[in-house]
Image (tube, rainbow, N blue to C red):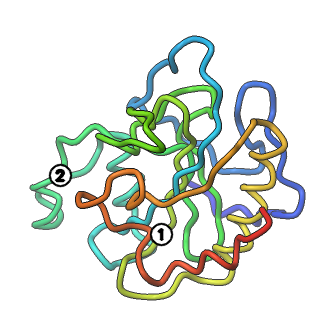
Amino acid sequence: MTNKKLKTSKLTLNAAGYVASATQIASPNVDARPENTNIDLIVIHNISLPPNIYKGSGVVQLFTNQLNPNEHPYYAEIYTRKVSSHFFIRRDGELMQFASCLQRAWHAGVSSWQGRERCNDFSVGVELEGSNFEAFEAAQYQTLKSLLNCLRKAYPIQHITGHSDIAPGRKTDPGPYFEWNRIKGC
């Protein structure tokens, strides 16, 4: 993994569904979207591994099925989970991509949005390095805003929502410290 200096004002999505300036790490935890499915929802999450610890390789290891259950007690509980997300934004604003937007990443789980089940089918998942217990960084919002604008240019995005809104009672992210007003207009 390299720490690329991201030019967030110029993010573009290519025809294959990749942001060229993002660090690309392929996750095996993806599959095909149903045919003729419009990508019209963006789901924002937060994640940190170990919990509330940043800058480590835990998230990358989880999304690539390489999490060592002996490295941290929490990892022993989750290392067999097959999950991914399209994007991960680190605290410093670095953008990582684990799946083409044309693929179905496994970020939403059991979910529903406005009466539509299986949100993974029609959404793009964006994970922010963080937790429910502290504010996100300005660099993350800058990258997120640029990414949201990029995705809106490429797909008929109708809504941007949190994991907590598509899986109420089961999920709480992006959490109380996510400032929705900072992405208004994206």
Q: Quadrant of residue 29?
A: top left
Which numbered marker is on residue 152?
none
Q: Is residue 154 above or below residue 142?
A: above
The image quarter in which residue 77 lies: bottom left
Q: Position of residue 23 (x, y in %)?
A: 64, 50
Residue 17 placed where, x, y %?
70, 31
Task: Give the CA distance from mark 1 to mark 2.
Answer: 17 Å
Residue under the point 47% across and 69% down: 129
Q: Where residue 106 sits in the image (x, y, percent)?
A: 39, 37
Q: Name the residue at 36% across, 69% down.
A: 48
Residue appearing at x 35%, y 42% in the figure? 111
> In the image, 92: left or right of 58?
right
Q: Quick one: label 1, few (<14), some, or many (20+) residues within 10 Å?
A: many
Q: Nearer the viewer, residue 34 or 8?
A: 34
- Mark 1: which amino acid? Glu
In the rendered image, the quadrant that contains the C terminus is bottom right
Q: Is residue 64 left or right of residue 160?
A: left
Q: Secondary structure at mark 1?
A: strand
Q: Quadrant of the N terminus?
A: bottom right
Mark 1 or mark 2: whose residue is earlier in sequence:
2
At numbered mark 2, what does the secondary structure look like: helix, strand or loop? helix
- Which residue is at the far front? 115
Quick one: which residue is furthest to the top in this view?
A: 35
User: Label 2, on which residue?
Assistant: 78
Residue extending furthest bottom? 134
Drawn side of residue 150 relative to residue 30, left or right: right
Q: Residues within 10 Å of mark 2 (few under 14, many from 20)?
A: some
Q: Which residue position is annotated with label 1? A: 129
Residue in the foreground of this view, choosing between 121 and 50? 121
Q: Position of residue 86 (x, y in %)?
A: 55, 43
Tell me the amino acid under the disc marked 2: Ile
> Which residue is rendered at x = 81% and y = 63% of the image?
8
